[in-house]
Amino acid sequence: MKSRYTIALAGNPNAGKTTVFNAITGSRQHVGNYPGVTVEKKEGFARHNDVELNIVDLPGTYSLTAYSVEEVVARNVLLEDKPDVVVDIVDSSNLERNLYLATQLAELSVPLVLAFNMSDVAENRGCNIDEQALAELLGVPIVKTVGHKNRGISALLDAVVAIAQDPAAAIAKQRRPNYGPEIEPHVKQLTDLIRQRCRLDHHDRWFAVKLLEGDEETARRINRLCPAHTEELLAEADRIKHHVEGICGDPAEIILADRRYGYISGACTESVTQTVEARHASSDKIDAVLTNRWLGLPIFALLMYMVFQFTFAFGNPAVDFLDGRLGELRSWVIEAWPGQGVLESLVVDGIIGGVGQVVVFVPLIMLLFMAISILEDTGYMARAAFVIDRLMHKIGLHGKSFIPMLIGFGCTVPGIMATRTLEARRDRLTTILVLPLMSCAARMPIYLLILGAFFPPRTVFKALGIFNVTNQAMLLFAIYLIGIILAIVCAKLLRKTLLRGEAMPFVMELPPYRMPTVKGLAIHMWERTWLYLRKAGTIILMIVVILWAMATWPALSETQVQTFEQQRTTIAARADLGKEQIRDRLSEIDNAELEAGLEHSAIGRIGRAVAPVLRPCGFDWKISTAMLGAFAAKEVFVGQMGLIYSVGADADEQSHLLRDRLAAEYSPLQGFCIMLFCLISMPCMVTVVVTARESGSLKWALLQVSYLTVLAWVITTAVYQAGSALGM
Amino acid sequence: MSVKDKGEATAMPLAMASVGQEVTFHSAHGGRGFQHRLAEMGLTPGISFRVLAKGSPGPFIITVKNTRLLLGHGMVHRIRVSLI
């Protein structure tokens, strides 16, 4: 007997799959990707009575057709990895819809256990389910669970292990929908034919049904598994399909779906009793307000305002705190470091300066993702899609595109991944292409640096004694707004040119309102924050080190260093100057040497080469150099500027020094242009890679990079030239 | 006779239904994939559902099989229903 089994968790979105997964595995889980696609792959481990269980969380799907990436992934895992047991997490308060997937799993003939999750909710709503009767009707064991209260999990694992030890018996017991006298004989006939011709384990009936549905993915799989008979099988399936459609008058796949729902509804009539009517009473009442024609939009706007207010009100003090600690760490390292040298510079300027700056902004990311998780877990996010659909439709997108865009304010990468839920390719591409215009949290450090350097805070107006609007807040708001407006314009243009066509209709389930659990929120938030931190620890660390090396080498030649040394000796020896004057002159020479060194280095040379192109935007070669760093990751811009100005400077004064140096060297107009360019110009490298992978071709990623960079150049140049002409 | 033929005479676009009304799903225009998707979400010919909210010209919220579905903009013109 095996003592280690692989268990796959299947289930509809919103069925509480994640809570059951968490309840089974606890903290022993890890998140990765399915090969080739960016669908998240969650795996975890559990031990139950000396049996080791390897749990694979399949993507949430309503069925096993092949319309979305998630469905294809779920199907491939079931057919190719062949898990020992499949647990279908069913939302007991939404039985019929959820059992649809269960009938398909039974049709696939995989060893199956049904977890009737959220059984407490179902009971509260007056829904009595006779599990025993239903289990007999379906031929599948049913276990009641309440995922977030850990209830029923042990019983579920008992059932899982029992099935794993005798899968053949379990499959033999399973009942599958009978498609009725007009269709069933033909399904049987095709199943038999497939069984005779090919060896497909025990999935013959599944293949027969899918061929009748005209499922192309299945046709290709048959072609792979038994190429000799594909033609015959497809021809036979086609003949039956035409015959059935002739009799019934509807496409075969629709009749099959209808019969499946009929089978489910029959089983439910015999085992489920409803004692209270109007099950969704409270959700309906909330919906009457939140999706109201007149109130919906203002409430939506208010909630969005609260999301950002929440993020920044709690986030900024935390960021300041971390920033202070980072400064202390810097001073401590400098003091403790034996001697001075290249390695110290790498640690202090490269790693602490570069990666530290990124980590400091984690509180903002966490809070934004927490706010988004609250909106998602309560069920409001789907209503937001409804409320905003009318506006989104005007720019050629629909309400569902809103969710990835909101996530994009946190980080573009998970935003792009969230576009997976958009079924129409054109909608998805348009959303991906404009997503970088949603100003992500990584750009915040740049804005804060510039605002601090050029726009000392002052109150612009006060209202009602509570609103205290500063010029900094207004500029920040303006930057975000410019990004949103550009996204609207670009989406509209894309829909009129490259991605022409009607907005695809969409269907989406509105989950009932639920109280989010603390554990659920914490896990949700942590998963996304972890992605950000991992980026800081890997990609950004690597890039910062490369940039640091490029800024350090090639070093100035002996003669050049000697020239500066001579100048220093001359100044120090002059008797006509006071102590103060000598010190000033010396630091001027230090800075000149620093600048000469940077100009001489690899990055300085590249920056100088690029500079003429960026000159119309108001940028000199130093800013150009930092902009190159920003392509690696937006946050790097700040670290890079720091690197340019801070080498050799007194460490604890570093951040002030950087701001002062910037303010001394550039005008506020140039500062604003830096913000503008960073907002619009080419997305970071990770975004480009993910765009290429998600869109399936490098072409779209290159288009994204080039159109955004050209747009940034045009707009920044226009603003800088106009501003200069006005004497700003 | 299929469900389709029964309601043909009285069928109208879903866009014309009003909030609170109970209607019967008749047919959907669009690709086979689109029709299949609707069927899998429970919208099969002959099923009845109630209109919960409508945005004009925006999306509809309907209840079918005890769940709520959001039908996007544009779909309401492609789905034909008959009044009960």
Image: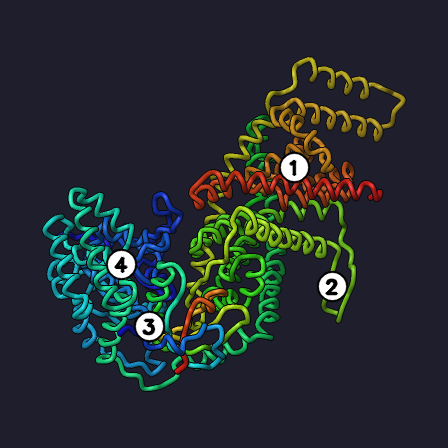
How crowded is the residue under tag 4: few (<14 C-alpha within 10 Å), some, or many (20+)?
many
Tell which circle, 4 or 2, labels the residue nearer the N-terminal end.
4
Tell which circle, 4 or 1, labels the residue nearer the N-terminal end.
4
**Residue A646 is at least partly visible in this image:** no
Name the residue beneath numbered marker 1.
A642
What is the secondary structure assignment of the residue under circle 4? loop
Front-most of residues A252 and A115: A252
Mark 2 — on which chain does it sit?
A
The image quadrant of residue A24 is: bottom left
Q: Residue A124: where, in percent of width, then height?
A: 36, 81
The image quadrant of residue A708 is: top right
**Residue A543 is at least partly visible in this image:** yes
Tell which circle, 2 or 1, labels the residue nearer the N-terminal end.
2
Q: Which mark is residue B4?
A: 3
Name the kind of residue labelled 3 in the image.
Lys
Name the residue beneath numbered marker 2.
A468
Mark 4 → mark 2, Cα distance in angstroms: 62 Å
The image quadrant of residue B4 is: bottom left
Q: Residue A224: where, in percent of width, then height?
A: 22, 43
Front-most of residues A139 and A528: A139
